[in-house]
Amino acid sequence: MSNEENIKSDNKSGDSSDLPTIPALDIGAEECDLLAELKNLTLKRPFDVKKLSPKVTKRVLFLKDIQVTHDELEEKFLAEKSALEATYDNLYKPLFAKRYEIVNGVVEAEAEKEGVPNFWLIAMKTNEMLANEITERDEAALKYLKDIRSCRVEDTSRNFKLEFLFDSNLYFKNSVLSKTYHVNDEDGPVLEKVIGTDIEWFPGKCLTHKVVVKKKTKKGPKKVNNIPMTKTENCESFFNFFKPPEIPEIDEVDDYDDFDTIMTEELQNLMDQDYDIAVTIRDKLIPHAVSWFTGEALVDEDDSDDNDDDDNDEKSD
Amino acid sequence: MSNDKDSFNVSDLTSALKDEDRAGLVNALKNKLQNLAGQHSDVLENLTPKIRRRVEVLREIQGKHDEIETKFREERAALEAKYQKLYQPLYNKRYEIVNGATEVEGAPEDAKMDQGDEKTAEEKGVPSFWLTALKNNDVISEEITERDEGALIYLKDIKWCKIEEPKGFKLEFFFDQNPYFKNTLLTKAYHMIDEDEPLLEKAIGTEIDWYPGKCLTQKILKKKPKKGAKNAKPITKTEDCESFFNFFNPPQVPDDDEDIDEERAEELQNLMEQDYDIGSTIREKIIPHAVSWFTGEAIEGEEFEIDNDDEDDIDEDEDEDEEDEDEDEEEDDEDEEEEVSKTKKKPSVLHKKGGRPQVTDDQQGERPPEC
């Protein structure tokens, strides 16, 4: 979305009909005050108040009063909306906490801590978008996923964070992997910053890289330097989600032209995909995890998307 | 409001509003979930009895959540509708002042001034109000050509409303009678795929009845014949050109059976995204804050503004319509709202995504809880 300043000149040769100058004597003290007030109110890009007659000026001021009334109402609306959302967040919390306890076997006083194995892995694989991100190698690590949560950041409704809680596992040290999205509201809803947890992989367990062994077979009398060459290569993995494509800092960009150049189409697409995944997790997976686990969520998807069913054949051990 | 996710019908939702019927609703919910479970039982069949019992408890918890979520959506929709009702008289008043239907308090009535009609017409309402407001917004001004401005000075109101079936919203542009096209109302409707996501399924615009030679979305090119050619008549060719009014002829997704190459698909997706950006900007920014855009104050709120010398002037083009004629127009407008929009019924292949990720308040799901 280009936000370049592209001001079009209003000056048309021969087209503009200048108003006759209003004689100073006709402008009373009241009109002068109105003009001064109007000038002050439009500091940036002020339109030429001289082109407005006193009557039109008065109407514009009246319109501004209406706008102020509207904006006050809008503030109330946004406050009520936030309060409503907070009310329902509090109603959801105990249900999510209960779900967590059952999935992870916290409630039952049994010797074996069984819970519902692979709950989140199965739920994620049932969603087509998320399933596309998960490789076979990822599944072994995702079995340790025990909860996914979302919350708002910095008291701004648009900024949010996703938290993935993991049991102790063989792959990485972190018990929480998080992803934070900062959305800049001022210039339209534009992603400003995306931050992911740095994953501390155990040696040889990194799922976002693979080791490629190049064997050089040298047949000859000398068998010197027979050590095989190894190379580390990036590979597909769900865990690339935590290393998002970087958005150039606005400060580094002189003007919009440079910004557009830096923001290549490919990078834009990567960011779109990344954000789509996050919103899917926040708005679909987290609130309806059980429905995704059992596959019932696909029924709704069928109705709206007309997709074929992807039956989940996952079998628990 | 139909809730696809829970496969509720309207009577179930109605009963949700009464406390005494909560138990009935819960039972209905359980029954529906069990019915749905029959269709996707792969997971359950492979679980041990203990785990299956736990999943059943989880499903009960999910049912409670979905019930609460349904209430949330109802309350949110009611809240939004409540404030739209509160905004409406303000929008009406704005319309009246902008179009000179009523005079503001304190302004003396200048009935039958001695000056000519031209002078009187200049003073009516706030001339070029909507054109100026649109041009002060970066996204919209890029779409407006100099030729368009002649037509847009006749724009006298912009409104939006929600569409329930299918879900989405509609923009309405009200025009005075003008020399360019016959329509007094141009509309643009957006049909969304999902209530909670800004995924566009289809966009439909009014077909504009241009007067002869006045079409702003096309231009006529004349090619001079070669010298000495027997046929001396000049060849004319009609060519598409940039115009704000292309907004009412949005890009359409071809049928499923039509083959569409990847490059074309991507180009089409970008066009649809841009189109949606324009529609969203008008609905969320221009309409609620039109006066602030008109005066330029709305621009101050936007960051990264380039400080250029002011080149914006308010056009004082004359508006020849009389007040009585406006009242007639308002009656015509009501008839026009029955107008059938141009329809191309093609199933959606591409899902529209924001040029940058779209974050729209109205279409957000639940807000995550505060950290």
Image (cartoon, coloured by chain):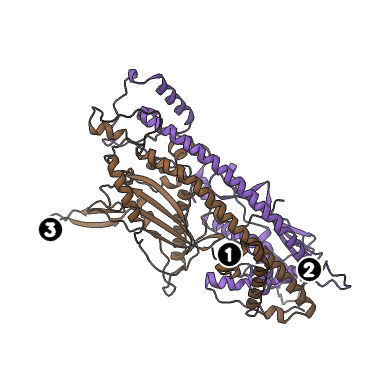
Q: Residues within 10 Å of mark 2 (few under 14, many from 20)?
A: some
Amino acid tagged 3: Ala
Q: Which mark is residue B14?
A: 1
**Is label 1 in a helix, a strand or a loop?**
helix
Q: Give the x, y percent position of residue A108.
A: 84, 70
Q: Spot the residue most to the right.
A: A111
Q: Quadrant of residue B340?
A: bottom left
**Is label 3 in a helix, a strand or a loop?**
loop
Q: Give the x, y percent position of residue B334.
A: 35, 53
- Residue that badge 3 annotates: B229
Tell me if I can see residue A125 in this picture. Answer: no
**Foreground tag (3 vs 1):** 1
Q: Give the x, y percent position of residue B347.
A: 44, 70
Say which quadrant the C terminus of chain A sits in. bottom right
Residue at point 67%, 46% (across, down)? A155
Of residue B26 and residue A237, the one placed in the foreground of this image is B26
Above or below — where is B69 with respect to B255? above
Q: Give the x, y percent position of residue B213.
A: 23, 52
- Chain drawn brown, letter? B
Of residue B40 and residue A164, the one placed in the foreground of this image is B40
Of residue B184 and residue A20, the one placed in the foreground of this image is B184
Above or below — where is B164 with respect to A221? above
